[in-house]
Image (tube, rainbow, N blue to C red):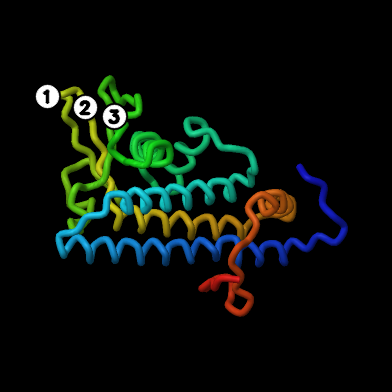
């Protein structure tokens, strides 16, 4: 644990993280909303931008990855199997297989090769079947995932094709994923509100690696709308 400076003010650190460190991620969500609205507008005109859809997947995964670092108070890379998958499953309420599919089959191909479907299985398996993932082919399909075939949940539903191709595919949708991301952000804010002085001191090291880019000095931490600083 990093030593605690004599002039360390836990409450000042807490409010700084709530307003600026996590407030920046409120700004990310606004950016993602704008991007999704534009992509849907383009799709209604018959124009589809798959590269920008991949960018939207990247933004969701980057936001969740940053939240995991804040939640875990870690400046070191977080392992997918031992940390990110169980952490995301707990924060979202998703089954472990869904969190596994998100990190490996949706996020990793976008980060590594720029496309969500190129390596959609990514070598993952579930109950002896190949585990695949992707996003709904039609970005304009806004049917809640909870109304799709079961099993399903916020932002995802599963198609089990083991009787035909020995495959299980998790389909994500941007609208539901946006809801899940906002819920995780709210939970991490609550976590920071409850952190002890020792835990807040650990966040100083995270702040050194992830400096605040946006500041919001006027608004309250519980209701921040960050502006670029």
Q: Which residue is mark 3?
A: 131
Residue 142 rendering spot, x and y as whole percentages: 20, 58
Q: Are marks 2 and 3 in contact (CB under 8 Å)?
A: yes
**Position of 198 relative to 190 (above/below):** above
Instruction: Report the Cα–Cα distance between label 2 and label 3.
Output: 6 Å
Q: Earlier in the sequence, mark 2 or mark 3?
A: 3
Residue 162 falls left or right of residue 198 = left
User: Quadrant where the N terminus lies?
Assistant: top right
Q: Which residue is mark 1?
A: 164
Q: Are marks 2 and 1 in contact (CB under 8 Å)?
A: yes
Number of the label disc, if any, that sits on residue 197: none
At a point 36% along the width and 53% down the height, the residue shown is: 56
At a point 53% along the width and 33% down the height, the residue shown is: 79
User: Quadrant where the C terminus lies?
Assistant: bottom right
At a point 19% along the width and 32% down the height, the residue shown is: 160
Q: Earlier in the sequence, mark 3 or mark 1?
A: 3
Q: Which residue is mark 2?
A: 167
**Position of 75 relative to 221 (above/below):** above
Q: Which image quadrant is residue 158 in?
A: top left
């Amino acid at each position: 644990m990093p030593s605690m400076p004599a002039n360390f003010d836990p409450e000042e650190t807490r409010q700084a993280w709530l307003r600026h460190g996590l407030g920046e991620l409120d700004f990310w969500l606004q950016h993602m909303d704008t991007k999704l609205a534009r992509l849907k507008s383009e799709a209604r005109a018959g124009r589809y931008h798959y590269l920008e859809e991949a960018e939207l997947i990247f933004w969701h995964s980057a936001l969740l990855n940053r939240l995991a670092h804040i939640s875990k108070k870690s400046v070191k890379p977080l392992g997918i199997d031992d940390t990110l998958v169980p952490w995301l499953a707990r924060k979202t309420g998703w089954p472990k297989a869904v969190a596994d599919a998100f990190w490996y089959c949706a996020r990793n191909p976008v980060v590594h090769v720029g496309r969500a479907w190129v390596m959609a299985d990514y070598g993952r398996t579930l109950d002896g079947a190949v585990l695949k993932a992707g996003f709904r082919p039609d970005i304009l399909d806004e049917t809640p995932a909870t109304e799709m075939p079961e099993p399903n949940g916020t932002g995802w539903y599963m198609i089990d094709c083991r009787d035909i191709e020995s495959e299980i595919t998790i389909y994500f949708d941007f609208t539901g994923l946006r809801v899940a991301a906002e819920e995780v952000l709210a939970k991490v804010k609550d976590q920071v509100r409850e952190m002890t002085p020792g835990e807040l001191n650990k966040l100083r090291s995270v702040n050194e690696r992830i400096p605040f880019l946006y500041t919001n000095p006027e608004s309250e931490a519980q209701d921040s709308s960050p502006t670029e600083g």
